[in-house]
Image: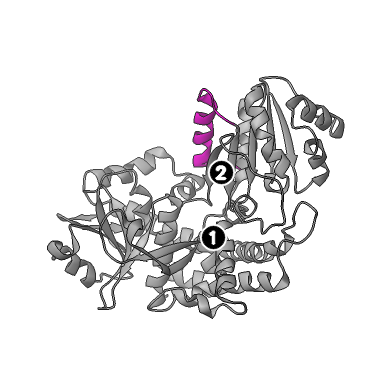
Amino acid sequence: MYFKRKIDEELKNWLKTNGHSPALIAGVRQCGKTSSIKKFATDHFKYVVYINFWEKPKMKQAFENSLAVDDIISLLSYQDTTFKFVPHETVIILDEIQDCSKARLSLKSFKEDKRFEVIASGSYIGLNIENKGRMSVSKPNGAEDVFVMKTMDFEEFLWAFNFDEIKIQILLNCLKEKKKIPDVIHSTMKELYKTYISIGGYPEVISMFLSNNRNYNIAFKKIRSLIFDIKGDPSKRKDENDKPLYTSYEIARIQNSFDLIPTFLLKENKRYVVSKIEGGNGLEKQDAINYLVNADVVFKVYNVSNLSLPLQNSAVLNNFKLFYSDISLFIGSSGFDTIEGIMSDTLGMNKGYLYEAAIAENFYKANIPLYYFKKNSGLEVDFVISYLKYPALIEVKASSGNAKSSKTILNNPDHYGKARLIKFGDYNIGFNDNFITLPYYLIFALNKISLF
């Protein structure tokens, strides 16, 4: 089952661009990179040469000596006689390229040669982590067009559920025209968003869910399998000499830092307390978090000391919340009864925390830098973004809360600066001068429609 993805259009534009470099698709494991690349390759090329360095490590041998294109394709032809290298008709896919650093270096040769298109892919875990002195091959500069792929966002989720552009445009038109969404559409979308929060955006989980009569239990079991794989990933990481990259102590810290995330997100403060990670000194605990960040498994949301743009200039680097990059990891770490609570609206006080994590994840997938604002005085705003040249306060409400802190900021522009407020909750579209209410599910529309 292939799902339409936003990377599809990005790759089409890449191929049409004069002077493009080989493409490098980076992203978290299991986000659908390989499926999207293979679909694009078969749709646009007569011949596809697919090499997976994880599954067939012997393929690395073709890149060990010369990086000249003719030498590489000659050796690859001997390793697999089914490969067909026809200039301008063959695309070469180098999957799990982080396991063959020489292959990544060869991208420069392929760019200069121009006879073959090359699409490489790899997880952040291999492309971004520090090599800790255990790997000796440098990485190329200027020889790659890099694309970052994440798990499916809510709009891609809607595509998977057969919501075409016409149906989605109806939602966008309501937002653009500042009118309420019709009740029948509103109720349908609310249920779909609850399903999205329950099973997340990993393509394989969605595929299992749809192919098994929308069985949440089967989807949950797949999520648990993904979590097991994510937590086991550090133990599989090896250097060029097939030696483990991480010690058992480092692996334990990484796993513990992953497990602690729901503990903090379900607290009133939500700030991640690094010192609570078991074992190691402060730097080693930070390394454990950095591993997960570089693997695109989690992302940080920093507190800002003031609301002046650019927000990153006032980020407090030792004060942050940590969120999973896909909401399913929160669900899988919390238990199946969380799904039951979401679908039956019986989560109680934990609903706000869960929906806050879901909204944060959607901002992350939309590549919108996200911060939060908290002062010792008690003033606190869930999130802050830069939006249309102003700071926009983002409040996520489980019920029709009054956003007291945000209103204090809006009513005191001389002290805090001019800001705007967007509230997400269980309500329909509503507009005011500097104050907008949106249903949770319209988060995907934020970078499509100018709200103010």
In the structure shown, which secondary structural element does the residue marked by tag 1 occupy?
helix
Query: Residue 119, relative to residue 243: is it above or below?
Result: above
273 lies left or right of 88: left
Q: Earlier in the sequence, mark 2 or mark 1?
A: 2
Query: Residue 323, relative to residue 389: is it above or below?
Result: below
Please name whichever residue, 140 or 217, is drawn nearer the observer in this view of the structure: 140
415 lies left or right of 150: left
Please name whichever residue, 107 or 362, is drawn nearer the observer in this view of the structure: 107
Judge the density around disc 2: few (<14), some (14-19), many (≥20) Cα neighbours within 10 Å.
some
* Count of numbered tags: 2
Please name whichever residue, 286 or 445, is drawn nearer the observer in this view of the structure: 286
The amino acid at mark 1 is Val
Magenta part of the chain: 1-21
Judge the density around disc 1: few (<14), some (14-19), many (≥20) Cα neighbours within 10 Å.
many
Question: In front of the other: label 2 or label 1?
Answer: 1
Residue matched to label 2: 3
The amino acid at mark 2 is Phe
Cα separation, mark 2 vs mark 1, equals 26 Å
Name the residue at 51% across, 50% down: 152
Query: Residue 57, relative to residue 266: is it above or below?
Result: above
Query: Residue 329, relative to residue 44: is it above or below?
Result: below
The answer to whether residue 388 shows anywhere in this view is: yes
In the structure shown, which secondary structural element does the residue marked by tag 2 occupy?
loop
Please name whichever residue, 173 or 307, is drawn nearer the observer in this view of the structure: 307
Badges 2 and 1: C-beta atoms under 8 Å apart?
no
Quarter of the figure with residue 404? bottom left
Residue matched to label 1: 293
414 lies left or right of 313: left
Q: Position of residue 73 (x, y in %)?
A: 78, 28
2 lies left or right of 200: right
Q: Position of residue 30 (x, y in %)?
A: 62, 52
Quarter of the figure with residue 381? bottom left
